[in-house]
Amino acid sequence: VEFRFTPEQQAFGAQARDFFAEHVTEDLLAGLERDQEEHSASFHERLAAKGWIGLQWPEERGGAGLTDIEAAMLMEAAGYYGAPMTGYLVAVIGGSTILTVGSEEQISRWLPGIARGEVIVALGYSEPEAGSDLASLGTRAIPTPDGWVLRGTKIFTSLAHHAGVALVAARTDPEARKHRGLTVFVVPMDRAGIGVAPIHTLGGFRTNTMSLDDVAVRPGDVLGEVGEGWATLGAALDLERTGASRLGLCRKLLDTIERELGPGGLTGAHEHMLWEFERRLAATRLLSYRAAWIVTQGKLPTAEAAMAKVASTELAQDIASAAISAVGSRALVGRDGGGPDGGLLERSYRNAARFTITAGTSEIQRTIIALAHLKLPRSA
Ligand SMILES: Cc1cc2nc3c(=O)[nH]c(=O)nc-3n(C[C@H](O)[C@H](O)[C@H](O)COP(=O)(O)OP(=O)(O)OC[C@H]3O[C@@H](n4cnc5c(N)ncnc54)[C@H](O)[C@@H]3O)c2cc1C
């Protein structure tokens, strides 16, 4: 067992930290908060210019030919500096899905623009009545002489208001069993019938509903096989779950708490709290990089990514709430009021609420661990 990054990986990590230190400026962060955005087109393009969008894709596909270890290192560094990485995450999930199951025509049409940061991806999977139980989704793909029309409503479609393309999951066969009869379509966002409306979140950024009002799609828009959408949906979700960005955020929060308390303000109880969080962070870091390493071995880290997600999201929430009680009222002051680190503690407390929901809730991750790791039988 070798618990060390290679010299090349260490150099990559240093390069990533330098990049974020330079480009995640207070102006950028203040602008995002003011505009209630979690995406900056200019920052996303700078990330793309480094070749880091889809950095684990092959070079001939516009990637950097690196691995999920470097992708996790990138996210860890991004999390420390608070970089707006939602555009990156949906690009990697959407792009990797297209790369894994898409046709040659779809790959050459979409991947280069996504890798260059010019095309933003939206993932149109969740619906008002289908989140954890995604297989019960109700958006219909109704057959027409040329293909289908999509009819339904998606919810929490991150960055749909910036997107050039959406991956949309719909039911092509209403008679088939729940996990069957689903199909994923790759849909240009300028198709007639797509409507996008904002949902404003506790975290202070905007997500969306996306309505599909008889949006025409053709056989060439099918991603993977008709009726095999369930497999397509799962093709690239593990990366988001490895949780590396939360490692960086946890480190930053702990540094800020320690600095705010200062040597004079640290009681025995604070020290105990900080040691305990350090212990959990070290263990979580191993879980996250183990999941990323499994991907480099050509395997799916289903249970391991679920473990990393539960550990990293719950740790980030615990640290964010402990910061409020440890630092006191100053921690509740946001950016405009001059709160610590540009209002980091206040913002993280609000924003951490979503961590245990997005990309599969903690309850669902625990079910995945029970089924995939413990091999427990599925309850009725
Ligand atoms: C900020 C944000 C961004 C998002 N971005 C996207 C996006 O870009 N694209 C997209 O498609 N989706 C997106 N989502 C949706 C996200 O994937 C869902 O919110 C998530 O899967 C949970 O679904 P739900 O909200 O419908 O909650 P529900 O599934 O209704 O769950 C409600 C509660 O019940 C629990 N629960 C449900 N089923 C079970 C069960 N079987 N066993 C035990 N407990 C259970 C859940 O754990 C949860 O606590 C986003 C969500 C958020 C908050």
Image: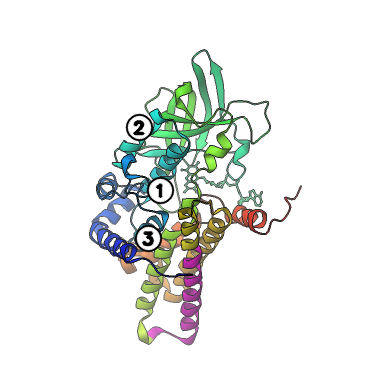
Q: Residue at x 55, y 50 (%)?
A: 360
Expressed as whole percent of the image width and height from the top left, the position of residue 356 reads: 53, 56
Residue stretch in magenta? 265-287
N-term mark: 2 or 1: 1
N-term mark: 3 or 2: 3
Expressed as whole percent of the image width and height from the top left, the position of residue 69 reads: 41, 58
**Mark 3 C-beta closer than 8 Å to ligand 1:** no
Nearer the observer: mark 2 or 1; the answer is 2
Please name the residue that numbered disc 3 is placed on: 73
Colouring scheme applied when the structure was drawn: rainbow
Amino acid marked by disc 1: Leu
- Tell me, yes or no, whether the highlighted magenta stretch contains residue 286: yes
Q: How many marks?
A: 3
Q: Residue at x 68, y 32 (%)?
A: 177
- The secondary element bearing badge 1 is classed as helix
Whether residue 61 is situated above or below residue 74 in the rendered picture: above
Please name the residue that numbered disc 1 is placed on: 89
Are there few (<14), some (14-19), or many (20+) residues within 10 Å of tag 1? some
In front of the other: 233 or 250: 233
User: Residue 348's image quarter?
Assistant: bottom left
Expressed as whole percent of the image width and height from the top left, the position of residue 380 reads: 76, 47
Q: Could you tell me if the residues under marks 2 and 1 are in contact, i.e. CB atoms within 8 Å?
A: no
